[in-house]
């Protein structure tokens, strides 16, 4: 399984969306079976920890499932935050 976190600004240009599509195709052509994405920046996740009432609808991929960020334990939240945030392809 491949867990990937991208910052939202990476998904704004058509060129970058094409690169994402290429990344996904390559992953599966090399035998990958499962990939999951989070598209959220670190600042948003940290702010959601400090102000959970402002982020009630924030969903993140964990490990084969999605969950509301603020329903998770702080340990799991920190694990999600610690994942590398990819800002470019």
Image (cartoon, rainbow, N blue to C red):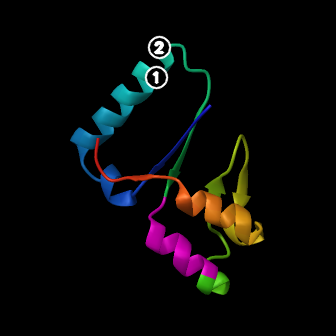
Relative to 57, 47 lies left or right:
left
Total number of numbered discs in the rendering: 2
- Is 8 situated above or below 63? below
Q: Which residue is mark 1?
A: 27
Contact (Cβ within 8 Å) of mark 1 with mark 2 = yes
The image quadrant that residue 41 belongs to is bottom left
Task: Answer left or right for 87 relative to 55.
Answer: left
Task: Please tell me which residue lies in front, 59 or 74.
Answer: 74
Q: Residue at x 49, y 73 (%)?
A: 44
Bounds of the magenta segment: 40-49
Q: Residue at x 76, y 66 (%)?
A: 72
The residue singled out by tag 2 in the image is 30
Image spot of residue 28 (x, y percent): 50, 18
Nearer to the camera, 1 or 51: 1
**Image location (x, y in percent) of residue 84:** 46, 52
Which residue is pictured at 40% across the width and 20% down the height?
26
Q: Is residue 81 magenta?
A: no
> For the residue labelled by badge 1, is the local secondary structure a helix, a strand or a loop?
helix
């Amino acid at each position: 399984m491949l867990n990937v976190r991208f910052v939202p600004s990476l998904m704004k240009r058509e060129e970058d969306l094409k690169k994402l599509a290429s990344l996904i195709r390559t992953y599966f052509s090399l035998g990958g079976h499962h990939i999951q994405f989070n598209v959220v920046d670190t600042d948003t996740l940290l702010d959601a920890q400090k102000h959970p009432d402002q982020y009630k609808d924030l969903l993140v991929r964990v490990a084969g499932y999605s969950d509301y960020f603020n329903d998770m334990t702080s340990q799991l939240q920190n694990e999600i935050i610690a994942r590398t945030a990819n800002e470019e392809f």
